[in-house]
Amino acid sequence: MVNPSSIHAALERARAHAPFLQLALQRETELADVFAAGRLPLPFAREDGEATMPVPTQLRLARRRLALSVAIGDLAGAYDLTDVTLILSTFADHALDAAIRTAIAERTPDVEPRGFAAIALGKQGSHELNYSSDIDPILIFDPATLPCRPREDVGEAAVRIARRVVEILQNRDGDGYVLRVDLRLRPSPEATPIALPVDAAISYYESLALPWERAAFIRARAAAGDLALGERFLAAIQPFIWRRALDFGAIGEIRGISRRIRDHHAHGQAFGAGYDLKRGRGGIREIEFFAQIHQLIHGGRDVSVRAPATRDALAALAAAGWIGASEATALSQAYTLLRTIEHRVQMVEDRQTHRLPEGAALDSLAQLHGLDDGAALLALLRPHVERVGAIYDALDPAEGAAMSFSAEHLAAQLAAAGFADPSGAARAIGQWRAGIYPALRSEAARSALEAVLPGLIEALGQAPDPSTAVARLDSMLSHLSSAINFFRLLQARPALARLLALILSHAETLAQALARRPELFDGLIDATALGPVGDVAALAAEMHGGQDYQALLDHVRRIVGEKRFALGTQIVAAASDPLAVAAGYARVAEAATEVLAAATVSEFVAVHGSVPDSELVILALGRFGGAALTHASDLDLIYLFTGDYRLESDGTKPLGAVLYYNRLAQRITGALSAPTASGPLYEIDTRLRPSGTQGPLSVSLDGFSRYQRESAWTWEHMALTRARPVFGSARARAEVQSVIDAVLCGERPQRDIVADAMAMRADMAKHKPPAGPLDAKLLPGGLVDLEFAVHVRQLTCLAGFSSSLSEAIGALAAAGLAPPTLGDAEALLTRLLVTLRLVAPDAAIPPAPTQRLIAGALGMADWDGVVASLAATRQEVVDFLVAVATGDRI
């Protein structure tokens, strides 16, 4: 509870230094008596008899009492800045809503006031309204639901309602006014009506809007009128506001606005008496712009930073690591003080001003705030203003970053940067400058290229293979439809240019992915992109969304593409162990399977219902079952269903269980494999199902169990050692796992496992030879030989069962059934396979720079070490395979 003496002191300062408050106290004698008694009234208290007054009169009287109550509470320290702005914003919402309802009711009495909404922008939208501020709404209407008079054009009716709303709020009489209204933030205000049809407004923001309008909508919300209509409008334009593809051009656009404001208000820039608290250098606007620039850049990918209020946004940006914690604290403290003093300025005359007065008026303002004089106020403000100005100015790129390279000096500069073949690189860059590709034909694109070229040449020159990097960048640019954002990103984040050079030097697979989807590179701006991708649950949560089914397919493909690209980049950048990357690839695939299978099941159930006491289970095998994929891995799946295969689904279009689950499996396979506008996802291989390609796509668990116990061949049991349920309820997964465990532990036909396996391996070697001298999978002593030996040992000894190959080897070694060093052999071969799938997918000997990358990934000092270790590892695997074939224990 506030101290009565604080209220008395505030009352004295208000009477002595704020003519507007003094006059309000004279007119609101009952409120003045409450203050004199040391109490604060409720902000929205209404006097008796007021309800019978016309709405405009009610609102004017309420606004005057509210302005007085808030001012005294603020000066007394009972309300902090958050309280003040929330109270003022809440009243603005109420007044705007009342004006809309009144305007509609006056024209069409006894009709529900719907089809007309106000979208609050600016400080009203973020609940940060000034003490004496205008509001900046956008007024929209729905032609299908807005009440109209007979034979009246609905567009004209909407404009008349809008004019009446402004009149109610803005017109003055002896009781003052309610709110100033500024409608100029609507699209093309010089040409559009003051109320816009909702679909036309959506169309504008989807196709024609400018970066500053995106910034304005960060703080937008449906504030009054038909809130459902307002929410529908805002939901529709979310992709306009929050773009996943980063647009660093927004920095230039918003900085340009700031520079124009500084130029226009030059006489309020110098700090001191007359300083503009809002528009001056280091002022309120620069704090807001600083937050909004970072929100526009990062908010498309990081929903945690989409906070409308400035201080909340700064805190969220700091928590997410996008800005420094000290910067956020400094800006937030400055914002609180500057806004508080701004309110003091406005309390004096109830004028929408932001400028510090001069002379005696500055002393009076300082005393209103509780300070001795104007010098004390300036001393209080100065360090905050200077700190804000320095932080905001640091957003500008370093001088000289946009210097261009003339053609006559380009080759020499390339040579100095480290290019062994500067003439070839110069020819390529010359073609880019000439606009040889569609992405480089606009003036804006070539300007962006020139701005980034100095840093790009430096980064490419330091690349392990500059010529290859330039050639692959050339190929990439030839496929792009637009290169502007790509170049702006590189200019804004020079470290990414060096990372790009590594990708282009080593990983053609990733370079080709960038050519198809340049926005993949945006994800690397987040430092977490070079860290673990998280567990399956976290990945699935990121892939989920409120989209319809088709949109979800696109969304999952975008997320998977970004995660796989980032994981591949981790290997190229030597940021992660390839074994950890392989596990990350598998978690991404498992999350995608879980999300898309669940969504497909829901879609299918909506039409065909569910089969009673039955559900789908997806079994992963091979490298997916072993939770260690490569960048190029397909997914080996088996679809099973629990329950009675003779039952029928209970939907409007019922199906028998067998047909039901086969169709469902087909749709899930399509969801996981069919390309969409966002690209492909995974290749799906279902040939490991019972009876192979001749069998049904989905089988009952009873049928699967019977087949494995009675008819399956050795190779199918070998495949089963890597089986792992990845979709289905915990109960169903356990039921499937119990069948697998029973089969592996002996409930299966008696076979000559060793003879069958060796014959199959020889046949595979004949029909599928190694792709090259580094084929870690198919070379003699490679991963396939290792897998065959491990699976035979598991099946013959009934030991070491685990879907993870490394865990299985560890268990066999602990039981004396495998050499203790075999785990190291598996790790080396897996690291090599995962790395080569990115940097040498043909398994050929790569250039020397990539040899060094591979050596590093394998923990070797040099390429000779890689060659020697691979030879020794292959021999160890061959020795183990021979031991298994001959029945030796180790």
Image (spheres, helix red, strand yellow):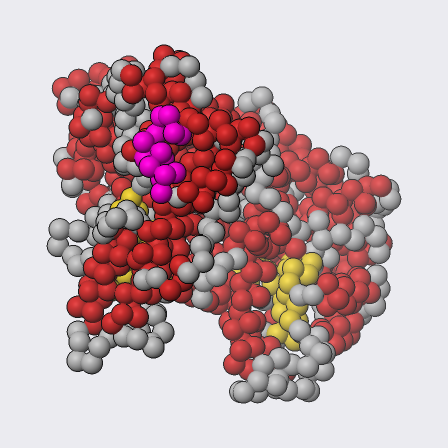
Residue drawn at x 20%, y 69% as measured from the top left: 157
- Between residues 69 and 288, which one lies in front from this camera angle? 69
* Residue 345 image point, x, y percent: 33, 29
- Count every numbered label the image shows and give the total: 0
Q: Is residue 23 magenta?
A: yes
Q: Is residue 488 above or below residue 812?
A: above
For residue 695, say whether it is visible: yes
Whether residue 415 is situated above or below residue 678 in the rendered picture: above
Q: Residue at x 64, y 87 (%)?
A: 648
- The percent position of residue 350, horizontal first and vertical second, equals 30, 37
Q: Where does the magenta region start and end?
A: 14-27
Q: Nearer the viewer, residue 110 or 866?
A: 110
Q: For the point 20% across and 59% down, which residue is it?
A: 163
Note whether residue 471 is visible. Answer: no
Q: Quadrant of the N terminus?
A: top right
Q: Is residue 443 left or right of residue 697?
A: left
Dividing the picture into quadrants, the one containing residue 548 is bottom left
| Rendered location of residue 783, percent (x, y) | 64, 45
Residue 458, by quadrant, is top left
Q: Is residue 758 above or below residue 72?
A: below
Residue depicted at x 56% and y 47%: 585
